[in-house]
Every structure is written in structure tokens, then in C-alpha cells.
Image (spheres, grey):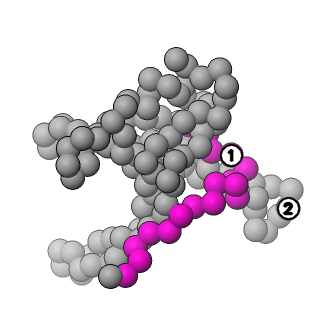
Amino acid sequence: MPINSAPVDQAAFTRLMLVQIEPKADRETGIQYTSKDGTERKWTVQVVASLPSRFDANRTDSEVLSVTVTSAEDPRDHIMEGEPVIFDGFTVGVMPPEKGEGDRIRGGKLFWQASGVRSRVASAKS
């Protein structure tokens, strides 16, 4: 079985800042996705991720990552927007490209997953 994901070294980022957390739900039914055994719910956690620029040592490059977090608890109960965060079990993988309708290609994109997310701020929302 091929490896489809790898651990992420969060120490490489200069910033992981929470933008938004929302339930990861089916677009048609609105029902929140769960783990295969149904014991944990899935959440979409959007963070601004910043890294030192490869081209200019005085700059950083940033983009918004959408991370799927599977958790029994609602992470919104413990983190506020704008807080720096850290992920538990943070991994990145690649969806294999496949032929879609007509000549369209689907997949071939990175996906981010974690088993939890928490604030790096000691006075986090309780």
C-alpha cells in the first residue's frame, strides 16, 4: 500500500493562526461528517500558515490552509479566531489525480489532516 500522507513539522512555520472553524458537512444534506466508526465529528479548520520566503530572507510567504480535524469535542469551545494554534497528529497528503468528466482532471491536490487543534495561548477561551 503506498504512503499517501506524511507528518508535518510545525516548527518550520513562523505562524499558524486560526481564521475559522466550521463543521465539515455534506453540501447536499448539511449533515456533519464523522469518523468511520461515528464516534468523532469532522471539522474544517482554516489557518493562515506562514513560512520564511525561499527567495527573500526578509519576507515570509503565507497562505490559508484548510485542515480537516477529527475530534469528539467541538474545537470552537477552546479556541478563538486570531489565536496562534498547534495541531495534534498534523499530516499532509496528496489526492491522486484521476480523469473526470470530459478531459477534466480531478485530484492532484494537497490535503491537510489532524487529530486535534489547540491554542498556543495560555489564556485560551474556556
As drawn, 34 above or below 61? above
Residue 111 in view: yes
* Pair 1/2: label in front: 1
Quarter-wise, where is residue 55 in the image?
bottom right
Task: Please state which amino acid type lies under the numbered disc 1.
Answer: Arg
As drawn, is 5 to the left or to the right of 79?
A: left
Say if the magenta span includes residue 12. Answer: yes
Mark 1: few, some, or many residues within 10 Å (few <14, many ≥20)? some
Residue at image position (45%, 57%) is 112
Question: Residue at the location (21% across, 75% down)?
Answer: 100
* Image quadrant containing the N terminus: bottom left
Residue under label 1: 15
User: Is residue 27 among the parts visible in the rendering?
Assistant: no
* Label located before the other in sequence (1 or 2): 1
Q: Is residue 19 left or right of residue 24?
A: right
**The disc labelled 2 sits on which kind of residue?**
Ala
Seen at 34% across and 76% down, the residue is 96
Which region shows up in magenta? 2-18
Q: Is residue 116 magenta?
A: no
Identify which residue, 66 or 73, lies in the foreground.
73
The residue indicated by pointer 2 is 57
Give the image location of residue 110, x and y in percent: 45, 65
Q: Which residue does the image show at 50% across and 25% down from the upper left?
A: 78
Q: Position of residue 68 (x, y in %)?
A: 39, 49
Marks 1 and 2 close (CB-CB < 8 Å): no
The spot of residue 98 in percent (x, y) is 27, 78
Q: Residue furthest right?
A: 58
Q: What percent of the width, then of the height, locates residue 65?
A: 51, 51
Give the total of numbered labels: 2
